[in-house]
Image (cartoon, coloured by chain):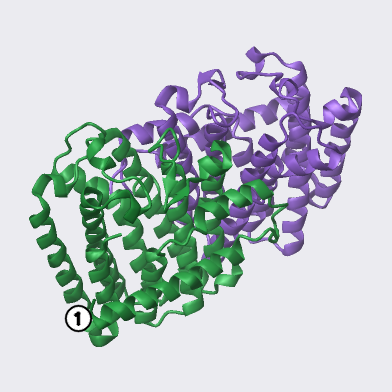
Chain colours: A purple, B green
Amino acid sequence: MSENSASFKIRLKNNAAEVEACLAGILTDTAQPDEIARPEPLLAAMRHGVLNGGKRLRPFLVMESAALLGGDAQAALRIGAALECVHSYSLVHDDLPAMDDDDLRRGQPTVHIAHGEANAILAGDSLLTLAFDIIAAPETGLQDRQKTELVLALARASGIGGMAGGQALDLAAEGLALDETGITTLQAMKTGALIRFACEAGAIIAGSSDADRRLMRQYGEKIGLAFQLADDLLDLTADAETMGKATGKDAARGKGTLVALHGKDWTEAQLARLVQEAATLLEPFGERADVLNEAARFVANRRS
Amino acid sequence: MSENSASFKIRLKNNAAEVEACLAGILTDTAQPDEIARPEPLLAAMRHGVLNGGKRLRPFLVMESAALLGGDAQAALRIGAALECVHSYSLVHDDLPAMDDDDLRRGQPTVHIAHGEANAILAGDSLLTLAFDIIAAPETGLQDRQKTELVLALARASGIGGMAGGQALDLAAEGLALDETGITTLQAMKTGALIRFACEAGAIIAGSSDADRRLMRQYGEKIGLAFQLADDLLDLTADAETMGKATGKDAARGKGTLVALHGKDWTEAQLARLVQEAATLLEPFGERADVLNEAARFVANRRS
């Protein structure tokens, strides 16, 4: 492990602790203004779904993108927390019996196993709703113009035209042999859109120029592609213990991946190319972009 | 039927047609900026869930509240459509096997019966997400400050501290004998919060004073209470044909209602009192509030 890589992992870990604390602070039993009460069983299911010691890669990307462009750190933390609520809700719902039917996530029982299916559905719904609450809340700071842009970009990244649509395509694709375009569209929606949003959000928080916002979107697209390729590679090679969840399921379900289509060597070459393309995009920022370059390498090389 | 009541029903019906057209225009297969694609099976499930010929009472309240206070009609229509997306998503998810397990709504198969359970979950998720998309989209007009307020108020009304929390309480209450406070809290969350939001949204759209906004909230609370009491009364007395859905289920599930607690006569007196209190709140507006007064009577007296 290079020195950069070691310090990157510490940075990621410290950041994850900050995000965890922020989310824990939001998910207390204290009703907020305009709320009537927070029923404990639902709150417990939400906390189970989101306070799970994840890597918090998406919030990290929000916060480091914002930091690179001079955005407010506290606002970026809150927007990162909002994004993690969306990511977590999608996992809670994807794990449901009617969807991927998974009992285990990060080595723990999934939300519907621990809290029942009805509470899992409602916890997912409430986490999604909470994400927009967090963006709009006064505590987040930011100008109303920025909040409107964040709400719209997050909604588009996570709704029918993004993540949820990607999950629908994924379920419909079981047993079908998708071609390269089909796989690429599915993955751009299911996992790419939120990761792209994470990087673009940093530019919105910083009030960046359209050019910088576009650049961060492009960087986010590279990271999103790399994330998915690494994930597909992992699904083939890792065992359940390393991943803390069932593996090899994609292949068992007949889901097409680019790894299955092109093989391991092509995939590793593609990952190296994406890391390089990300670095080229970030060149204008010089050394200040070191963390985001390291993030691209981390995403491409991750083994869990 | 009084002359007022007849013309009110025509107004409500025309309004519902406008809302239906607005929602149909939004739920096309054309991907919007920042969207990647709109998968047809998911879109079909969303359309099934929301384009169902409902009365569109909540959008009506948004639009008439905004009209009373001088808000832009086009913006109010869009915010009404957003609110209907939230209401519809909640019905799609509430009908799921793990929740209320209903096969029939408004005389039609529910979304999971017609489109499968996975698509029903994702359609609900996507409708909820779309609501915030609609508020933030440029087509809605309004100032960013107003959009932020609408996003926050809608999220609080529909999340753990509002509608979703109310549904969690409702599921937890099956077979328990809730006391008056328990029932009132549950109903204020499950149905009251969205109806209150509808009326408050009119004031936000109109850029009203804090005093007028508070007044519309209070009016919305009266309407919300009346709506629930009328609903509980209907559940006891109507047959499935009139309602287009299963009836008598609340009693069969042992769910407590104020009607069950206090009887039919008390409930009818309470409904009359709520209509009167709503009228008192609207007195400052004189005759211009006729439609909203008629709305209160309609909600209290509805028989389907």
Disc 1: host chain: B
The quadrant where residue A11 appears: top right
Q: Name the residue under label 1.
A: B283
Q: Can you say whether B81 is above or below B231 in the image?
A: below
Where is residue B204? Give x, y as percent. Answer: 40, 71
Q: Which residue shows up at 58% across the image and 64% down it?
A: B24
Mark 1, other Cα within 10 Å: few <14 / some 14–19 / many ≥20: some
- Quarter that holds the C terminus of chain A: top right
Q: Which amino acid does label 1 sit on?
A: Glu
Say if residue A33 shows up in the picture: no
How many dots with numbers? 1
The quadrant where residue B34 appears: bottom right
Mark 1 lies on a secondary structure that is helix
Q: Can you say whether B253 is above or below A112 in the image?
A: below
Pick the front one: B236 or B296: B236
- Quarter that holds the N terminus of chain A: top right
Pick the front one: A77 or B234: B234
Where is residue A78? Give x, y as percent. Answer: 51, 47
Q: Which residue shows up at 74% across the image and 52% down it?
A: A217
Q: Can you say whether A161 is above or below B117 in the image?
A: below
Say if residue A59 shows up in the picture: yes
Where is residue A179? Give x, y as percent. Answer: 85, 37
Pick the front one: A56 or A184: A184
Q: Which residue shows up at 74% across the image and 32% down it?
A: A299
Where is residue A166? Give x, y as percent. Answer: 68, 42
From the viewer's perspective, tell me whether residue A299 is left or right of residue B280.
right
From the viewer's perspective, tell me whether residue A292 is left or right of residue A49.
right
Q: Which residue shows up at 53% across the image and 30% down it?
A: A96
Pick the front one: B304 or B84: B304
